[in-house]
Image (cartoon, rainbow, N blue to C red):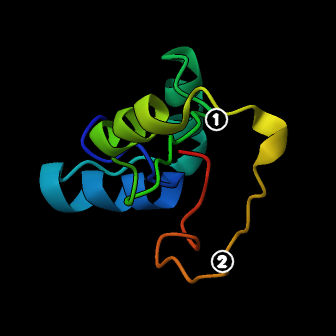
């Protein structure tokens, strides 16, 4: 689970069967995962374009300009990661 926290129970069941030769029901896996307090973990998503050095440089250069002077435009784009599930 720690290697891939986004696994569904049926995927975890398949991994256990293939790698450890352990046959276990999804209900048993659900109870075990719940007892381990691992249910409904949120997967953190960070934009791939995010660059902390670039952000700090921008803030140093434009940080003294009042926020109401800025107009922000957003460009539409496709992110190959948008179809991934949020819950692990």
Q: Position of residue 55 (x, y in %)?
A: 41, 40
Residue under the point 41% across and 46% down = 24
In the depicted view, which residue is nearer to us: 52 or 48?
A: 52
Q: Which tag, 1 or 2, sits closer to the chain's start?
A: 1
- Tell me the residue that label 2 is attached to: 75
Compared to residue 7, the image places residue 67 above or below, namely above
* In the image: residue 51, left or right of residue 32: left
Residue under the point 35% across and 37% down = 57
Residue under the point 39% across and 60% down = 49
Q: Position of residue 26 (x, y in %)?
A: 55, 49
Compared to residue 84, the image places residue 65 above or below, namely above
Q: Is any atom of residue 1 visible in this view?
A: no
Q: How far apart, in angstroms, are the residues tagged by discs 1 and 2?
A: 32 Å
Q: Quadrant of the N terminus?
A: top left
Secondary structure of the residue carrying tag 2 is loop
In the depicted view, which residue is nearer to us: 63 or 41?
A: 63
Secondary structure of the residue carrying tag 1 is loop
What crowding class fits label 1: few (fewer than 14 Cα within 10 Å), some (14-19), or many (20 or more)?
few
Compared to residue 29, the image places residue 36 above or below, namely above
Residue under the point 59% across and 24% down = 34
What crowding class fits label 2: few (fewer than 14 Cα within 10 Å), some (14-19), or many (20 or more)?
few
- Tell me the residue that label 1 is attached to: 40
Q: Are marks 1 and 2 in contact (CB under 8 Å)?
A: no
């Amino acid at each position: 689970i720690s290697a891939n926290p986004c696994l569904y129970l049926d995927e975890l069941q398949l991994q256990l069967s293939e790698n450890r030769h352990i046959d276990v029901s999804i209900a048993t896996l659900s109870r075990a995962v719940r007892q381990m307090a691992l249910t409904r973990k949120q997967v953190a998503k960070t934009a791939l374009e995010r660059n902390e050095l670039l952000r700090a440089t921008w803030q140093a250069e434009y940080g003294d300009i009042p926020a109401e002077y800025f107009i922000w435009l957003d460009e539409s784009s496709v992110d190959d990661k948008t179809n991934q599930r949020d819950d692990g």
